[in-house]
Image: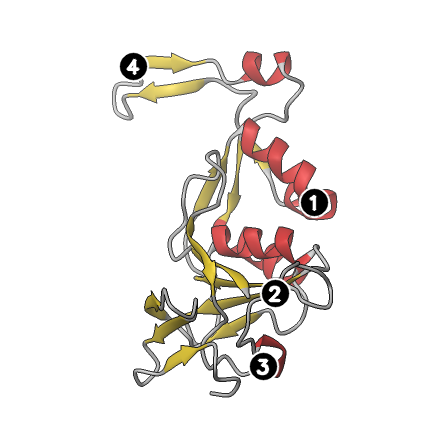
């Protein structure tokens, strides 16, 4: 079965936009505990009956936002493998540029509205590099005009835990599997089988297993 493995262990610049595709290959998630993820054969067509299996490594903002978009497709089954045993509020503000906000609004209007409720606009203010002691500006950036010309939202910031929580709450139940950090994966060119190695007691998962 054609399967997509995505590596999103670290937050990547949202303006680039949140996707890191490590490999598209024939595979199925590790022993990841779901009979629905069992697959030992290729299929000719991706459909609701024979969905594309998507394994996302890392439950950061990038991994969660990707999972949100892909989970809308009825011909995909998505799981996020996250190293942390549980999510905790950690980290400060993250900046979302105008083009990132525009992309998010087009990807999911409901998520975008929730982000706006906790968002602080900065792009409509004076921006640049300033000496914090002498209050001298080294350079100034016009963030407002480009956004206005393209009818995009102003750049701004949101607390990273708030953004992560919004995406977590928007995903179907059971999508995120905590306590499962992906160390590496390998593929068998002969069978198309993918084996993912997890850091949980050196557990290994491959397409012939359905239970941890």
Q: Which picture quadrant has residue 77?
A: bottom right
Nearer to us: label 4 or label 3: 3
Nearer to us: label 2 or label 4: 2
Front position in the image: 136 or 202: 202
How far apart in space, not on screen, are marks 3 and 1 (Cα)?
27 Å
Front position in the image: 209 or 90: 209
Task: Report the label total.
Answer: 4
| Mark positioned earlier in the residue sequence (4 or 3) | 3
How far apart in space, not on screen, are marks 2 and 3 (Cα)?
19 Å
- The circle on residue 34 is 3
- Judge the density around disc 2: few (<14), some (14-19), many (≥20) Cα neighbours within 10 Å: some
| Mark positioned earlier in the residue sequence (4 or 1) | 1
| Mark positioned earlier in the residue sequence (2 or 1) | 2
Residue 40 placed where, x, y %? 53, 77
- Determine whether 145 is above or below 60 in the image: above
| Residue, disc 1 | 108
Nearer to us: label 2 or label 3: 2
Nearer to us: label 2 or label 1: 2
Residue 78 placed where, x, y %? 59, 64
| Mark positioned earlier in the residue sequence (2 or 3) | 3
How far apart in space, not on screen, are marks 2 and 4 (Cα)?
63 Å
| Residue, disc 4 | 136
At a point 56% along the width and 12% down the height, the residue shown is 145
């Amino acid at each position: 079965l054609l399967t997509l493995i995505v590596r999103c262990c670290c937050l990547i610049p949202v303006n680039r936009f949140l996707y890191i595709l490590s490999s598209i290959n024939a595979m199925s998630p590790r022993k990841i505990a779901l009979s629905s993820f069992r697959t030992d054969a290729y299929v000719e067509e991706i459909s609701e009956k024979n969905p594309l299996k998507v394994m996302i490594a890392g439950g950061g903002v990038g991994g969660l936002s990707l999972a949100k978009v892909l989970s809308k497709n009825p011909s995909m089954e998505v799981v996020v493998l996250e190293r942390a045993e549980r999510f905790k509020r950690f980290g400060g503000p993250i900046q979302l540029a105008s083009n990132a906000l525009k992309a998010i609004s087009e990807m999911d209007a409901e998520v975008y509205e929730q982000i706006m409720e906790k968002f602080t606009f900065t792009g409509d203010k004076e921006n640049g590099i300033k000496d914090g002691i002498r209050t001298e500006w080294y350079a100034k950036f016009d963030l407002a005009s480009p956004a206005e010309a393209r009818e995009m939202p102003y750049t701004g910031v949101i607390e990273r835990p708030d953004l992560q929580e919004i995406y977590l709450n928007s995903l179907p139940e059971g999508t995120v599997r905590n306590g499962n950090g992906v160390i590496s994966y390998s593929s068998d060119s002969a069978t198309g089988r993918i084996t993912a190695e997890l850091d949980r007691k050196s557990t290994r998962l491959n397409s012939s297993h359905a239970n941890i």
